[in-house]
Structures are given as C-alpha cells and as structure tokens.
C-alpha cells in the first residue's frame, strides 16, 4: 500500500536535526548573516552531531543515509537559516560526484576520510562566463604524462573560500562541448589554486561563496572523477540527486515564514480585531500551508525514486522549480501579513525573503528545470490518448451503429480544422476550412 508516513528511524533523524537547528543554529543565525561570514565551528558542530556527509555509503564507513534522510535534515536546517543549511549541505553536493564515480580507489581513499574527519568539499561547474550551460565549461584540463594540468576560473562556488577539497569540472577541449568535459577531485592546498574573496550577496550571507582560480594546477590521473566525455553526465546525475534537497531547503525556510505569519496574525489587531480573523489573511495562510505540503510530496517522491534505484531526474526538476517558486510566494505573502514590520530587520521575514530568493537560481535555474521537464513531457512521456488527427469523435454515429459499423458510418476527419465527414468517400473540399480532399483521413471504421 502507498505510504506517506516516516518510519521511526527517519522520525528520529528529523528530530535530531530539528533539535540541532533550534539549539545550535538559531542562536547565531542572525549574527553571522549580519557579519556576512561562515562560522566553521557551526559546520563542525553539524559534523560532530552526525548531521553532515550523511550520504557516504556504510561500505566506506559512512552513515549510508538515503536521499530522504538528506532532505529531512536540510528542511530542518533551512527552517532556521538557509545560509548555514546551504553550507552544511554543500558537502553532500561536493561528495556526490565521488560517490557516483567509477574510480573505486579514489572512493576508498577519500570517502572514509570524509566520514571520520571534519573536512569541507565544494562543487564547481560554474564559471564567470557560464552557469546554466554546463557544456560551455572553459576551465581547461590538459593531459600531461600521468597528470592533468588545470587552468581556468570557477565562480559562485559555495564554500569555495573555506573548503579543503573541490570536485571540479573542466574540459580537455572547450570547442568539443559535452564530449570534452571531465571531472577531478582536487586538494584546495595544491600549488596554483587561489581562492577569491567572499562574494557579497543579497541573502544566505552566512554561506561562503567565492571564485576559485586554477593556475597550472597539476592533478594526478588517480584523482579523475570522470574521464573526458563522461563529466557532463556525472554533473547531471549529481544534480538529479541534489535538486530535491534544494527544494527542501526552500520549503524549510518557507515553513518558518508561514509559522511566523500565523503567530503574528493571531496577535496583531487592526480595525478592532486580530488580523487572523480576516478571511483574506486566512486564505493566504491556507495557500501557504497547501504549497508547503504539495512541494514536500513532490520532494519526497523524488527522494523515494532515488532511494528505490530509479532515475529521479524529472521529479527532481519538478520538485526543484515547484518548491523554490512556491517558497518565494509564501515568504512574500508572509511578509505582507506583517505589514511594515515585515520590512524591518527587527523581524525575521526580511532575512527569509533575501535567503529564499536564491533557491530558484542555483543548481539549475527555474528556466533550466522547465527545459528538462518540457523536454521529457514532449519527447519521452507516453501519451494515453491517440493523436488528434486519429480522434474519431463519433458523437454523430451513436452507440448502436458503433457496435456494427457499416458503410454508412464511415467517418473522415479533416486534419486541418477537425471537421468529421460521414460518407463512403471524403468530400472534394472541407465545407468549413476549404482544404482539399487530401486533407481528410479515415477515422472510422478503424483499419
Ligand atoms: C549564491 C550562489 C551559490 C552558488 N553555488 C554554486 C556552487 O557551489 N557551484 C557551482 O558550480 N555553481 C554555483 N552557483 C552558480 C549557479 O548554479 C548559477 O548561477 C546558475 O546555474 C545560473 O547560471 P548563471 O548565473 O551563469 O546564469 P546564466 O546561465 O547566464 O543565465 C541567465 C538567465 O538566463 C536564463 N537562461 C539561460 N539559458 C536559458 C534557456 N536555454 N532558456 C531560457 N532561459 C535561459 C537563466 O535561467 C537565467 O535566468 C551558485 C550561484 C549563487 C548565486
């Protein structure tokens, strides 16, 4: 039977994440947002609490959590601070190419290390000149003996200024697009790696974002995550497994916006009564709640697909653009319920709005998710209905004749305007659109 309830172990994961978020993240969230700084000690606490790198398979000494546990964690962290949540989750994003890679010796060397020690790893496809178009990577990886030499700049890299390692995507030939793309695990202390300054941002200011420059960085072939030609697919497979978490980050933050709005609406009096008594406010709250529940169902479905060994790509994209856009609407409505106070820094809504704005952009913009989903709907999805031109529309024939169709019931459909003509042969031309006989197709009886 279809089941939407969480088993006790997952409820326990959610409870631990919630307690950690409320006790460790909440007291310092506004301070570090204002300071525009990522506190390493907070990330280390998450690691020590067993709430980071949770998707490392148990075979490599990790917890072996699935995507579902991952999204339960991220929702709770983001409910308190999306900036912290993004920086904590970034290790899962950075490790995913290694987990998905076929380089077994690299996995055996690094995954147990990440399971045991507090180390940060970031993920880099984006560059100053490209983000959406991953096939347009310019950062160059030149084979030289047993090594690759990396040259180029990665931009917008979450934790790029503080990470110990980077999963970096490059190309052996920028002109060859998808076919040239490869990926490497690189130590950020390697000679020739430089970190840019923390990029000032609208929101998620407690999450470090920086450029990373590679100047003749020598990477041993043993550190190849994907050889040339396989890097693009590795990047896309990584996103399929991380986009649902971006949805849950957005929904976590939106959930808090709704909770604050309900609290405020029950206390604020306008025109002699609490604003919670106005139906306009109640309807906003109903829609917030509905959007959160709808988004969560889609996110959980993507997680279920991934954890069951199915390809979650399409559901992951739908979950990402639905949840992140719904979250933006929710926080906007919540701020409206606060009136002028919502616009001040004394209440949490302005930070939530700034933070939530990012989710429709990183890990593939909403537009890119729409391209993925529309591509599937138009080319891979199997329709149930016959093509329009084959639709018989037998309303004029009636069930008695349909059961024993004879000559008199032969039906022809004009492929241009849809008119159905009954008769042994199609007409010379269509009486509606004047298209010639050749535009008619026999639709009944079926041949
Ligand atoms: C705070 C932050 C953290 C980030 N962290 C990371 C990270 O850790 N690692 C990493 O690699 N990247 C990271 N990114 C980069 C992020 O993934 C990109 O910003 C994003 O993919 C969009 O790329 P772009 O900014 O180059 O926009 P562009 O690709 O230049 O797109 C500009 C606009 O055009 C639209 N567009 C593009 N192509 C199409 C199309 N075919 N049809 C319709 N519309 C289109 C886009 O949706 C967008 O609205 C981060 C970004 C930010 C802001």
Image (spheres, rainbow, N blue to C red):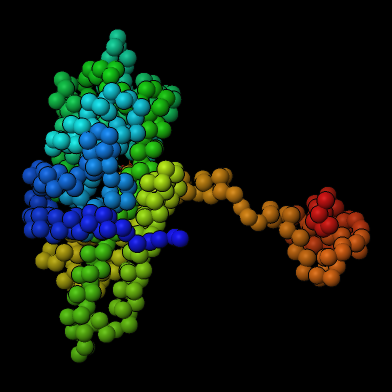
Q: Which residue sits at x=31%, y=58%?
A: 7
> Does residue 332 appear left or right of residue 119 in this picture?
right
Residue 136: where, in percent of width, then height?
38, 31
| Residue plotted at (18% across, 39% down) | 159
Q: Is residue 137 left or right of residue 256?
A: right
From this viewpoint, which residue is outermost toward the bottom? 272
Please indicate, yes or no, whether residue 156 appears anywhere in the rendered image: no
Please state if 58 lies on the left or on the right of 80 as rendered: right
* On screen, residue 268 above or below 169: below
Indicate which quadrant contains ligand 1.
Answer: top left
Q: Where is 436 relative to 53, above or below?
A: below
| Viewer-proximal residue among 135 and 70 | 70
Q: Is residue 397 visible?
A: yes
User: For residue 219, what is the image quadrant?
Assistant: top left
Question: In the depicted view, which residue is nearer to us: 66 or 139?
Answer: 66
Which picture quadrant has residue 424? bottom right
- Expressed as whole percent of the image width and height from the top left, the position of residue 401 reads 86, 67
Seen at 16% across and 22% down, the residue is 190
Horizontal and vertical percent position of residue 211: 21, 34
Q: Pick the residue in front: 354 or 432.
A: 354
Q: Position of residue 353 (x, y in %)?
A: 23, 60
Q: Residue at x 31, y 20 (%)?
A: 141
The N terminus sits in image quarter: bottom left
Location of residue 225 (image quadrant): top left
Please count the marks in the image: 0
């Amino acid at each position: 039977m279809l089941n939407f309830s969480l088993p006790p172990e997952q409820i326990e994961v959610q409870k631990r994440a919630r307690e950690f978020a409320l006790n460790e993240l909440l007291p310092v969230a506004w301070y570090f947002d204002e300071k525009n700084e990522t506190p390493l000690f907070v990330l280390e606490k998450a690691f020590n609490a067993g709430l980071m790198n949770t998707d490392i398979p148990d075979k490599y000494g990790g917890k072996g959590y699935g995507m579902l546990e991952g999204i339960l964690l991220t929702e709770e962290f983001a409910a308190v601070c999306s900036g912290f949540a993004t920086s904590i989750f970034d290790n899962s994003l950075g490790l995913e190419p290694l987990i998905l890679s076929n380089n077994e010796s690299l996995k055996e060397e690094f995954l147990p290390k990440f399971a045991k020690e507090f180390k940060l790893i970031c993920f880099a496809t984006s560059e100053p000149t490209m983000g959406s178009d991953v096939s347009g990577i310019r950062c160059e990886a030149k084979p030289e003996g047993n090594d690759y030499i990396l040259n180029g700049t990665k931009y917008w890299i979450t934790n790029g200024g503080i990470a110990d390692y980077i999963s970096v995507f490059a190309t052996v030939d920028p002109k060859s697009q998808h076919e040239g793309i490869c990926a490497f695990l690189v130590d950020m202390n390697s000679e020739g790696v430089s970190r840019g300054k923390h990029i000032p941002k609208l929101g998620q200011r407690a999450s470090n974002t920086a450029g990373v420059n590679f100047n003749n960085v020598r990477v041993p072939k043993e550190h190849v995550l994907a050889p040339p030609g396989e890097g693009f697919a590795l990047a896309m497979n990584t996103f399929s497994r991380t986009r649902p978490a971006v949805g849950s980050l957005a929904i976590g933050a939106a959930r808090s916006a709704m909770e604050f709005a309900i609290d405020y609406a029950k206390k604020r009096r306008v025109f002699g009564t609490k604003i919670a008594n106005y139906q306009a406010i109640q309807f906003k709250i109903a829609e917030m709640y509905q959007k959160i529940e709808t988004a969560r169902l889609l996110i959980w479905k993507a997680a279920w697909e991934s954890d069951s060994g199915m390809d979650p790509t399409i559901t992951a994209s739908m979950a990402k653009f639905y949840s992140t856009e719904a979250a933006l609407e929710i926080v906007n409505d919540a701020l409206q319920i606060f009136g002028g106070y919502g616009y001040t820094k004394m209440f949490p809504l302005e930070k939530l709005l700034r933070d939530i704005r990012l989710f429709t952009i990183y890990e593939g913009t909403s537009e890119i998710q729409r391209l993925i989903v529309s591509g599937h709907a138009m080319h891979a999805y199997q329709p149930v209905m016959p093509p329009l031109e084959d639709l018989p529309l037998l309303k004029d024939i009636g069930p008695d004749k349909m059961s024993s169709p004879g000559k008199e019931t032969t039906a022809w459909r004009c492929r241009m305007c849809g008119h159905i003509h009954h008769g042994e042969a199609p007409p010379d031309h269509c009486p509606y659109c004047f298209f010639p006989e050749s535009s008619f197709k026999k639709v009944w009886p079926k041949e």
